[in-house]
Image (spheres, rainbow, N blue to C red):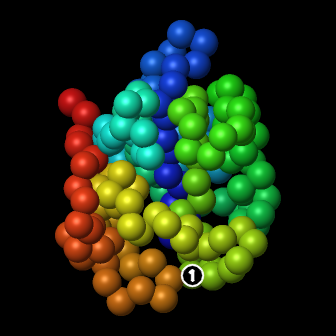
Amino acid sequence: MILIAAGSNLPFCGVDSQQVVLHSIFAVGQITELVAKSPLYSSPAWPDPADPPFVNAVAEIRTAMEPAALLAALHAVETAFGRRRGRKNAPRTLDLDLIAYGDVRSDRPALPHPRAFSRDFVMAPLCDIAPDWRPPGEARTAAEILKGLPDRTARPIG
């Protein structure tokens, strides 16, 4: 299973963060095969909750691209949606993370994503599409991981 997390907390060209996330998943689906898409979630910005809240979603895709090539393609989609890399954890128009690529475990790119499974804004939408999925090297399912998270701030939108 190949999983991508999408997040936005800034508009782009007059399009709000909800639409940015939805359109970005559509864009990823143009270069891969989109298998499933979660509903949208809202979560407070981190580390500064005074920043605009994030809109988050997770998508499952299929592709023949190798992980590094897929990550480069995701970065190209981010750039197309106005992403400018600057200060770490700053507000942004789009953030696309490669969460998992099958059973691949690597340092470059970091797979599975080293922090994804401690973030409810990733795990909650992931559980909507794959609650029984187990990350590589993990005994617990996605639903069990989410249940064990101490901070649950992500909320479904709509």
Q: Residue at x 39, y 79 (%)?
A: 134
Q: Residue furthest top?
A: 14
Residue matched to label 1: 103
At horizontal 21% and vertical 30% (from top left) the residue drawn is 158
Which percent across, then down, holds residue 150?
23, 66
| Residue 110 drawn at (x, y percent) | 66, 71
On screen, residue 118 versus residue 111, left or right, reads left
Position above or below: 16 against 104: above
Residue 77 figure quarter? top right
* Left or right: 64 as drawn, with respect to 145: right
Up-down relation of residue 146 to residue 48 (above or below) = below
Q: Nearer the viewer, residue 80 or 1?
A: 80
Identified by mark 1, the residue type is: Asp
Q: Residues within 10 Å of mark 1 (few under 14, many from 20)?
A: some
Q: Is residue 47 left or right of residue 110?
A: left
Could you say which quadrant of the image residue 46 lies in? top left
Residue at left 37%, top 74%? 133
With respect to residue 30, does 121 lie above or below? Answer: below
Q: Position of residue 114 (x, y in %)?
A: 54, 71
Q: In the structure shown, which secondary structural element does the residue marked by tag 1 occupy?
A: loop
**Residue 48 is at least partly visible in this image:** yes
Residue nearest the observer in this picture, 40 or 48: 48
**Which residue lies at the image location 31% right of the left edge and 78% below the top edge?**
141
